[in-house]
């Protein structure tokens, strides 16, 4: 099974420079990206079988990751 990459570089490839600039200048954006990256790493580990959790927990993590991605996208669009 192939796992789709969901890191910010793959989610917003054209916005790499803007992401880096916001990380450097906006503490809130930096915190959100850090949490997004932590969640993404955790989800990937679960999907790869490195960690075992129940399906409900995995879905909760994915929903939180999606909410963060939406917040980050809004900040990038502003």
Image (spheres, rainbow, N blue to C red):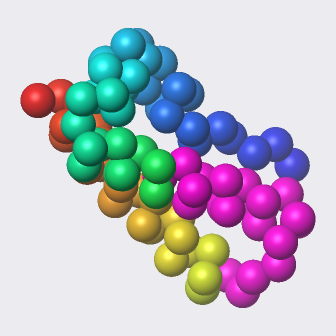
Residue 29 magenta-highlighted: no
Q: Residue 29 location, x and y as percent?
A: 28, 43
Q: Residue 35 location, x and y as percent?
A: 46, 56
Left or right: where does residue 9 sit relative to residue 68?
right
Quarter-of-image position of residue 4: top right
Left or right: where does residue 52 sit relative to residue 58?
right
Residue 50 magenta-highlighted: yes
> In this view of the protein, which residue sits in the foreground, 28 or 42?
28
Left or right: where does residue 15 sit relative to residue 54?
left
In the image, residue 30 sits, relative to residue 25, either above or below, namely: below
Q: Residue 61 location, x and y as percent?
A: 54, 70
Quarter-of-image position of residue 27: top left
Q: Residue at x 56, y 60 (%)?
A: 39
The magenta region covers 36-55
Give the mark count: 0
Which SS type dominates the magenta stretch?
A: helix
> In this view of the protein, which residue sits in the foreground, 9 or 38?
38
């Amino acid at each position: 099974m192939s796992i789709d990459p969901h890191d910010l570089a793959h989610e917003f490839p054209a916005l790499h420079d803007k992401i880096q600039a916001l990380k450097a200048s906006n503490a809130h954006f930096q915190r959100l990206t850090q949490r997004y990256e932590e969640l993404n790493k955790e989800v990937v580990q679960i999907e790869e079988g490195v960690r075992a959790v129940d399906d409900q927990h995995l879905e909760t993590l994915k929903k939180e990751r999606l909410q963060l991605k939406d917040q980050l996208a809004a900040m990038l669009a502003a």
